[in-house]
């Protein structure tokens, strides 16, 4: 039992361990005597005779409280209390002085002490109470301090969440917009210029489609890391959504300085990204705009966005850089106009198909047409397909436009049948974006079924440029469509994208020579030689060759001599509406019947005369 009591006493003394900073030994002993009575001897008291000594002792040992004499040699009152409280912020401080001025007490409490005692008024009870109150106040202060620190940490975390992209840890759009506004303000005051780069990853959707969104996310993180390593510390980089990144530079002395940054950014994409042991190649399209050419954040971002999309349209697979121009803005304003009218156009049936007859040189009586989409807008007037097809070809609306064409193809076939005319083939244009959808074959065949169109009457046309850029995604769909009986044609062959390999991969039915090969072919010996070679190659691959854009008799005769199978162009037929085609055939039939009746009448009259 005695051993346990000693342990208890030792524990209690450790709980009541005090430090006194006092240079008067008598005062120290008076305090010790008061503590002896107050704590029944269960305490320890260490003493030092200077502020420096107190600071050293506190750095080596934890004390329940510090009793500090205000009149130590070299003591600087308020500043010493502040320093002690900051260096040992967990230790309560009680000021001990012979002064009775209450202002001293108030000042010491203001700078960090927990209580104040005068030497001539100390009793064991007052000292014990002061120590207890000082310790409680210190606990409350520490709790408040920790709460404030926690709140500050949480506020900082919330600030980071609000301003940081969760995936890449780059600045997000909100942070970017604030930073850009601030930079514009500084540039305006300093009359400086800077550049904004708008980056979009080419074919990022294919990565998600082929490998999954987790791989796509990892690609974005790796792109963000490379870009961070590339830009200067004074440049600003953000991810503003999807696969789009923004960089705006520090102030530039000359706009030409941007070329070095662009070179560094492009080089970061030279090597493949390694994700799950897969090598993934991607390149950015980069639009560049400058302040103060655009003097607001909205206009600066808009200009860079315009430039980026222009670069993407020009070179969609390889990395491209495009600088904003006024002409570009006009082009995209027109694009926005067309997009804004799309819903109205569909509701009011403003889209229709015209049909251009294709002449077969071996079977002149065969009826073959190509369906060509037209848009006669109630607000914008006639809109060229060269304008609206590139805008809509990568959006879901392209399927609606294809269904409109198939519906009118059925109407043409039905009305021609009523005139005893059999349409053997109608060529319908589709896009690579449609064929890249794994369900397109099933959808297309269901559209044919809904319109009661036989698959072998329909031939889909895909431009050569689309085939070359999307070979893998197109190949499977084309095989499935051909297996169902749908014919396939490659359009615009020889327009500058030619890759003979895909002719071996794709088992197509028709090869349509681009108009650039046919224009003036009768006078171009080299063109004739090239076309002759293509025709020979196509025939060996069991393809029919169609010459497009034939507008003169000389071009027609040359193509015929070179052994083209079919001719398409204004020399024979222009695109016509269904109404005009039917009217023309009715006239032909009526004329033919009238001519037949005249022959029959003349024959009967001759027989009567003979009798």
Image (tube, rainbow, N blue to C red):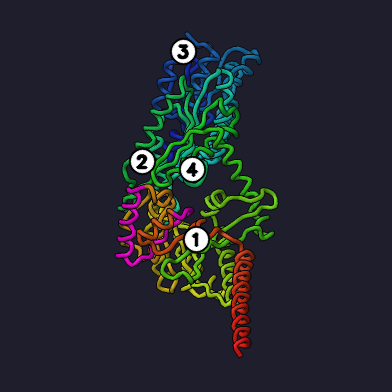
Residue at left offset 41%, top offset 65%: 478
Mark 2 or mark 3, which is nearer the start of the sequence? 3
Q: Is residue 468 visible?
A: yes
Start and end of the magenta stretch? 524-553
What separation in Å lies between label 1 and label 4 (alpha carbons)?
31 Å
Numbered mark located on residue 429 in the image: 1
Q: Secondary structure at mark 3?
A: loop
Please state which of residues 575 and 129 is positioned toward the viewer in this rendering.
575
**Which numbered mark, 3 or 2, is in the foreground of this view?**
2
Whole-angstrom CA distance, mark 1 to mark 2, is 35 Å
Label 2 CA crowd tier, 10 Å (few <14, some 14–19, many 20+): some
* Identity of the residue drawn at 49% across and 21% down: 84
Number of the label disc, if any, that sits on residue 23: 3
Task: Name the spot of residue 10 as percent of width and height, x first.
Answer: 41, 36
Separation of disc 2 and disc 4 at Cα?
Answer: 15 Å
- Residue beneath the point at 51% across and 33% down: 324
Say whether marks 1 and 4 touch (CB < 8 Å).
no
Q: Compare marks 1 and 3 and give the one earlier in the sequence.
A: 3
Q: Which residue is mark 4?
A: 244
Determine which quarter of the picture holds residue 110: top right
């Amino acid at each position: 039992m005695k051993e346990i009591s000693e342990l208890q006493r030792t524990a209690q003394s450790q709980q009541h361990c005090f430090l006194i900073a006092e240079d008067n030994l008598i005062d120290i002993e008076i305090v010790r005597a008061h503590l002896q009575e107050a704590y029944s001897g269960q305490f320890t008291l260490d003493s030092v005779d200077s502020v420096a000594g107190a600071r050293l002792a506190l750095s080596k040992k934890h004390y329940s409280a510090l009793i500090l004499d205000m009149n130590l040699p070299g003591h600087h009152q308020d500043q010493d209390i502040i320093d002690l409280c900051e260096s040992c912020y967990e230790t309560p401080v009680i000021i001990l002085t012979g002064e009775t001025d209450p202002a001293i007490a108030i000042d010491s409490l203001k700078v960090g002490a927990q209580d104040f005692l005068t030497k001539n008024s100390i009793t064991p009870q007052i000292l014990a109470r002061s120590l207890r109150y000082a310790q409680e106040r210190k606990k409350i202060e520490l709790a408040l301090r920790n709460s404030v620190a926690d709140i500050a940490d949480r506020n900082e975390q919330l600030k980071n969440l609000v301003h940081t992209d969760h995936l890449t840890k780059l600045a997000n759009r909100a942070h970017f917009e604030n930073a850009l506004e601030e930079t514009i303000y500084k540039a305006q005051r300093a009359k400086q210029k800077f550049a904004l780069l708008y980056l979009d990853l080419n074919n990022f959707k294919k990565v998600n489609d082929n490998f999954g969104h987790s791989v796509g996310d990892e690609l974005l993180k790796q792109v963000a890391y490379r870009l961070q390593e590339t830009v200067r510390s004074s440049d600003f980089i953000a991810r503003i959504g999807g696969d789009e990144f923004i960089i705006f530079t520090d102030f530039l002395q000359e706009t030409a300085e941007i070329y070095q940054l662009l070179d560094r950014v492009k080089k970061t994409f030279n090597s493949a990204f390694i994700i799950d042991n897969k090598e993934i190649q991607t390149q950015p399209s980069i639009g560049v705009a400058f302040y103060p050419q655009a003097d607001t954040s909205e206009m600066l971002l808009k200009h860079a966005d315009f430039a980026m999309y222009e670069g993407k349209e020009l070179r969609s697979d390889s990395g491209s850089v495009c600088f904003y121009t006024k002409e570009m803005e006009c082009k995209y304003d027109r694009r926005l106009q067309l997009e804004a009218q799309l819903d109205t156009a569909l509701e009011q049936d403003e889209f229709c198909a015209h049909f251009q007859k294709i002449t077969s040189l071996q079977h002149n009586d065969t009826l073959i047409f190509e369906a060509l989409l037209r848009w006669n807008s109630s607000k914008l007037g006639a809109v060229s397909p060269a304008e609206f097809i590139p805008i809509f070809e990568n959006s879901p609306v392209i399927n609606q436009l294809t269904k409109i064409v198939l519906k009118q193809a059925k109407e043409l076939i039905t009305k021609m049948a009523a005139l005893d005319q059999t349409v053997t083939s109608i060529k319908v244009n589709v896009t690579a974006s449609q064929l890249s959808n794994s369900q397109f074959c099933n959808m297309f065949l269901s559209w044919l079924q809904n319109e009661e169109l036989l698959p072998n009457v329909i031939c889909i046309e895909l431009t050569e440029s689309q085939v070359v850029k999307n070979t893998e995604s197109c190949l499977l769909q084309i095989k499935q469509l051909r297996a169902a009986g749908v014919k396939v044609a490659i359009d615009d062959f020889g327009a500058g994208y030619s890759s003979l390999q895909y002719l071996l991969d794709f088992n197509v039915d028709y090869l349509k020579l681009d108009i650039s090969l046919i224009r003036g072919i009768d006078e171009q010996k080299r063109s004739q030689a090239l076309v002759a070679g293509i025709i020979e190659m196509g025939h060996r691959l069991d393809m029919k060759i169609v010459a497009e854009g034939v507008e003169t008799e000389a071009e027609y005769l040359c193509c015929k001599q070179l052994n083209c199978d079919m001719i398409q162009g204004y020399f024979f037929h222009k695109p016509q509406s269904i109404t005009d085609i039917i009217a023309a055939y009715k006239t032909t039939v009526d004329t033919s019947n009238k001519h037949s009746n005249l022959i029959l009448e003349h024959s009967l009259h001759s027989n009567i005369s003979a009798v």
